[in-house]
Image (cartoon, grey):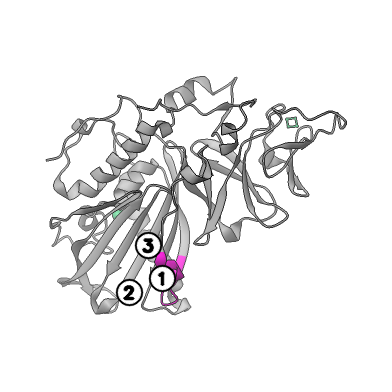
Amino acid sequence: MLTQTYGAPGDRSMLKNLWYVILPSSQLTNDLTAIRIVGQSFVAFRDEHGKACLLSDVCVHRGGSLSAGKKVGGSVQCPYHGWRFGADGRCTHIPAQPNLKIPIKARIDAYPTIERYGWIWAFLGDLPEDERPPLPILDWLSDDAVRTVSGHFDWESSWDRVIENGLDFAHAPFVHGSTFGDVNHPEIESFDVDSKEWSGSARMIMRRPARKGLLRRKSLSESVEVVTVPGFHLSGPCTTLELELPRGWRIYIVSAHVPLDANRTRTWWMMGRTFLRSPLLDRKFIVSNIRIFKQDHAVLKNVRPERVPDSWQQEVSLKSDALQISFRKRVQELEHRGWRIDELRLAQEFTGRKACAVPCPERRRIDSWAIEQIPVHPQE
Ligand code: FES
Ligand SMILES: [Fe+2]
């Protein structure tokens, strides 16, 4: 049995200094799009060169919501008094006083972005480029032999609960008995966790009901062995899954889990397959993946506590939960670096009279800002 206590009592939390998927590349236009991540509001758009940009949504003048404004050239124009902000977050124009030297504090946080794997990732934090964690490596997405479909799914659950669910295969026979789980074979053979700097994975053999053709009815009596490799990445929080089915058929899934708020998560997912690659079958694979998410959600939205508990003494964990435990430990390491958002202070101090923003890298260079940084737990 694995038991351990860590952290201060209270809330587990969302993290800054990670890469979060803001949108699929195909969905971001030149116009303004409102984005919510870690309980904060942002505005996304493409600049005149097509580069994806993400800014804090709060105008430093009188708090206008920039995403309700409009694009003027490469700038965002606030809907309230028309101040304009460039893609770097600096104010470029103040219509009421056009000849005024623009104050240094007239700037908002602007976040680094990378477009990769068909998604736009934004770095929500203040680390300089050489200290930022690397994005996950997902080789199968560039393999022509893999046919990929994608989508998103919204959970009424916290991001860490959703990630742990993606690493948990003991639930499959019970939650997914009508899809891929096999209630006659619930055992999890012992496995080792393969830990890397920003990720962890495990290789296990699962039994699934046999099917005549993957999309046909499953057999109630026969089962097949499926090599199953679940994993997680922390740098851009996501779970991955590789399945090796009989006949060498493979399935790959990546799910980027983005905390919208403390208890709401959006999962951007992509699923690749090396078989039945006709585009005519894409719909069936999308529907079956969403059905599986819905089965998970029906259970996950009711677990208590809503968040992964601070104290491991308040749960009973087994060796078959080792991959989730490994994930928790790694999150804890990041929390100790001072990356953990203090949700209690956020709720108490930053409602009503004070706004805040996730700090961007420019805050390390310039210390004159109108809007306070989102509160974090101190480094340990
Ligand atoms: S609040 Fe944005 S310009 Fe005044
Ligand atoms: Fe599941």
Dot 1 crowding, Cα within 10 Å, few <14, some 14–19, many 20+ = few
Residue placed most toward the observer, 14 or 351? 14
- Residue 332 visible at all: yes
Q: Who's the residue at 27% across and 73% down the image?
A: 217
Q: CA distance from mark 1 to mark 3?
A: 15 Å
- Which region is colored magenta? 139-149
> Would you name the residue on which mark 1 appears?
284
- Residue 340 visible at all: no
Q: Who's the residue at 26% across and 58% down the image?
A: 176
Q: CA distance from mark 1 to mark 2?
A: 8 Å
The mark that comes first in sequence, 1 or 2, is 2
> Would you name the residue on which mark 3 appears?
253
User: Would you say the beta carbon of the disc 3 residue lies within 8 angstroms of ligand 2?
Assistant: no
Is residue 238 depicted above or below 356 in this figure? Answer: below
Query: For residue 140: magenta?
Result: yes
**Element carrying mark 1:** helix
Q: Is residue 212 left or right of residue 109?
A: left
Query: For residue 295: magenta?
Result: no
Q: Is residue 314 left or right of residue 54?
A: left
- Picture quarter with ligand 1: top right
Circle 1: residue type: Lys
> Would you name the residue on which mark 2 appears?
215
On the image, the x and y values in percent for residue 34 come to 61, 44
The mark that comes first in sequence, 3 or 2, is 2
